[in-house]
Image: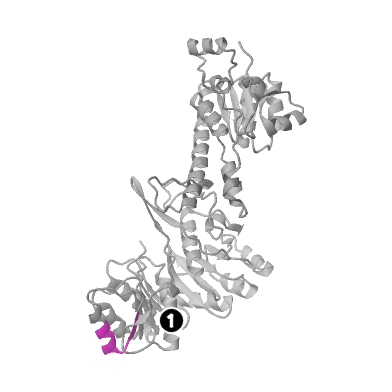
Amino acid sequence: MYTKRALISVSNKEGIVPFAKKLESLGIEIISTGGTSRVLKEGGVKVIGISDVTGFPEILDGRVKTLHPNIHSGLLAMRSEESHMKQLEEHNIAPIDYVIVNLYPFKETIERPETTFEEAIENIDIGGPTMLRAASKNYQDVAVVTDPTDYEELVHELEKHGEISVERRKMLAAKVFRHTAAYDAMIANYLTDQTGELYPETYTVTYEKKQDLRYGENPHQKAAFYREPIGPISSIANALQLHGKELSYNNINDAQAALEMVKEFNQPAAVAVKHMNPCGVGVAGTIAEAYQKAYEADPVSIFGGIVALNEEVDKETADQLKNIFLEIVIAPHFSKEALEILSAKKNIRLLSVSMDEAPMDRSVMTSIYGGTLVQEQDDKGFLDADVRVVTKREPSEQEWQDLKLAWKIVKHVKSNAIVLAKGDKTIGIGAGQMNRVGSAAIAVEQAGEEAVGSAMGSDAFFPMKDTVEAAGAAGVTAIIQPGGSIRDEESISMADELGITMVFTGIRHFKH
């Protein structure tokens, strides 16, 4: 029986010396390379240099050191195959039974803003993934570890049983292939971004698990939360939870929807969300006043909802927020007093999220059974629109203000969508209906008498004049919509007849 060997080559040196010492104490010889070899030797571990195994020096500034038959034959030889073992003996090659490798820090390299393209390329590992893949392919005979968190369990099993079970080796091999797949996906995406290709022939993405969730949309559905390895800062995936129990699947969806909406505003704003649709939005001179407007917009629906604010939550705002049951409050910061007030409520979650991040060009994925739809994010705002007044009457200054608010919010409402705004707050929101008149009816009913003098926003054009008629009957005085219907003139004529000012934007905001 031969002496077992472990090949160790890691960029993440965390815990590697005590781990190697444990292996050594179990009679396992250690082979190592470059920087890892130096660290192990300094830690008192006896190391066989890689060049002693290959009979060939490390060359090309370390680009070539483990890519050698003496290494890969030792990894790939099947111990149960007599011919394999005979060939190893003929060529004086020793089997390698344990591979402990983690890869060049490509992710950490490209995360640094100052990283050059050349530096990124140099941090693409070649030998590491090759060894990992070879060892994992031969998992029946080789245990392979790429994650330092697995060191302790590996040693425990070796000490207890003298070997690693086939089941454990298979699990470790699967973990390795997930790791190398994610590593290659990051490299592929980085290089694709560098070339400017938007929709390449294959679309490869990778995510890291942030947490297991108690359940999905419903208690009978299992779920987990994953985040992009190098994703946007201004995201619930990168939020800091300051208080409260774990977020649920629906919490995360709703929280991200609220965050996206509140980021539309430069002035103090508050957005309340239920089931990914806004139920109240307010804009004001202070964040406390903005929240009060959002609350007044729909004091019934906000109960049990999620509130996002784009400025620090102060004591005055916290005193208002504490008065009703809210699932989550999202803000860039919470003052010390606000945190104390809100933390007294056991069930509320408090999330701190950066909102300073500049807008990024991003793709949005929608999963379907057996596939994925990929599109650009809808980042068009009012300033991007081809805004033109199509009626005889121009909007007043207040109507322009209300129209802009309605347009910012209708973009985030499930289609068909109608939003009524008045006095820097939403007063009626109709979402997700099968026809536009139905959405308008819901918004008008919610607004009640406040609909008089309000502005209406529609996510898509009016195919008929009936929505304008409904708006006029409710007292709406201004409408903003994309335009583009073959029957636009009917809607324009009806608006003129009712004294309503109408604005076209040329941009549709369907949201499904």
Residue 235, position in %: x, y? 53, 59
Q: Is residue 299 visible?
A: no
Q: Which SS class for mark 1?
A: helix
Q: Residues within 10 Å of mark 1 (few under 14, many from 20)?
A: many
Residue at x 49%, y 39% (from the top left corner): 181
Q: Is residue 249 above or below residue 406?
A: above
Of 177 and 56, nearer the camera is: 56
**Residue at numbered disc 1:** 402
Quarter containing the N terminus = top right
Q: Is residue 221 visible?
A: yes
- The amino acid type of the residue labelled 1 equals Asp
Residue at far front of view: 60
Q: Which residues are magenta?
A: 492-503
Residue 133, position in %: x, y? 51, 30
Q: Is residue 192 above or below residue 332?
A: above
Quarter containing the C terminus = bottom left
Residue at x 61%, y 25% (from the top left corner): 157
